[in-house]
Amino acid sequence: MITVDHVSKRYDSLQALNEVHLTIQEGSCFGLVGPNGAGKSTLMKILSGVLQNFDGDIIVQGISIKKERVKVKKLIGYIPQDICLEETLTAKDNLLYFGSLYGLKGKDLQDRTGKVLQQIGLEERGKDKVITFSGGMKRRLNIGCAILHDPSIIIMDEPTVGIDPQSRNSIFSIIQELKEKGSTIIYSSHYMEEVEQLCDSIGLIDKGALVECGTMAELQQKYNKPSLFISGEGLDEVDLTTHGEVEAKGNGFLLQSDDPLMTLEKLIAEFRIQNILPRRLELYQPKLEDIFFKLTGTQLRDS
Ligand code: ADP
């Protein structure tokens, strides 16, 4: 288990993290979601032992990062948001270099380098200089450099920013493989769909504070009742509030209902009488975006 124990961090007068407390199960994939500037990178750097000056503690497998940073760092592979590679070297030489920093040498280093090149799907390009690589390939190599020492915990800070969909899928496959191997993944993103797709549990962070944490199912159950989405002309003629709690969403309304199918039938009957043809009338599956908005009043993407 990994415990983020009441972690706070200030940059001069700016409170970047405020008493963040959460636990992450080993072998799970944990997603940290929040808008730009929420404090995700700061927490990722603290978790990985890169940033040392903070209040609180991180406990990994019973070991305090404050007391035994080097020991904890060996368990962790940290993939920073900014790509950190030597572009004039080949992919393989970059891996050999980073492997040696982790203390690997000789046959061990060669074996791991070959394995990792395969894992990140770059075995054909090992001898090519990084300068010739696409952004997505560099991102994959960046991941490779952090997993050479075969860490049990992998921390990824927004690994899909600015890359094409194909490279994104390839990164997802790498993550899937690491998950199947039993690695613990800590993944930050401001793309909710990614986190919904990849992660078992989720922490929502805004302005340095953890606003909610749990599995997707727990969050949905807690915050979002089943709903219908309705849009179109003439809806003013119908008092939607007689059918349930109504909330404006985009160009229409979300109507909460414990029995959405029954509500749907009643609405259709009422629309027939009033001669209203809605543009959209559908069952609505709540998304992480909706929960985040409900909790913070902030859209993740536009911030
Ligand atoms: P996120 O990763 O969610 O975008 P960050 O952790 O990078 O958020 O930043 C949180 C806040 O801390 C932001 O307001 C950012 O400008 C500020 N910040 C981050 N790093 C530094 C730093 N080294 N010095 C001063 N302020 C910083």
Image: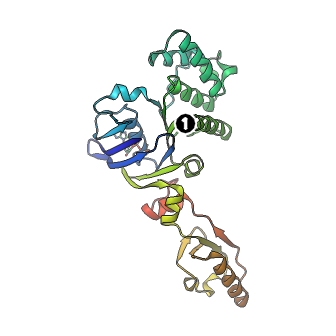
Q: Residue furthest top?
A: 106
Mark 1 secondary-structure assignment: loop
**Residue 229 versus residue 298 in the image, above or below:** below
**Residue 166 versus residue 114 in the image, above or below:** below
Residue 218 rendering spot, x and y as whole percentages: 50, 59
What residue is shown at x 37% (from left), y 32% (from top)?
49
Q: Quadrant of residue 114?
A: top right
Residue 285 rendering spot, x and y as whole percentages: 61, 64
Can residue 90 be seen at all in this image of the molecule? no
**Residue 30 versus residue 151 in the image, above or below:** below
Q: How many marks?
A: 1
Residue 6 rendering spot, x and y as whole percentages: 30, 47
Q: Quadrant of residue 93?
A: top right
Per the image, the residue denoted by label 1 is 182
The front one of 64 and 125 is 64
Q: Is disc 1 surrounded by few (<14), some (14 to 19) or many (20+) residues within 10 Å?
A: some
Q: Classify residue 211 as left or right of residue 108.
A: left
The front one of 176 and 38 is 176
Q: Please tell me in which quarter of the rendered image ligand 1 is found.
A: top left
Can residue 125 be seen at all in this image of the molecule? yes
Quadrant the N terminus occupies: top left
Residue 171 rendering spot, x and y as whole percentages: 61, 36
- Give, as a three-letter code, the residue at label 1: Gly
Q: Quadrant of residue 181?
A: top right
What residue is shown at x 52% (from left), y 35% (from top)?
183
- Disc 1 under 8 Å from ligand 1? The reply is no
What residue is shown at x 54% (from left), y 58% (from top)?
217
Coloring scheme used: rainbow
The front one of 138 and 63 is 63
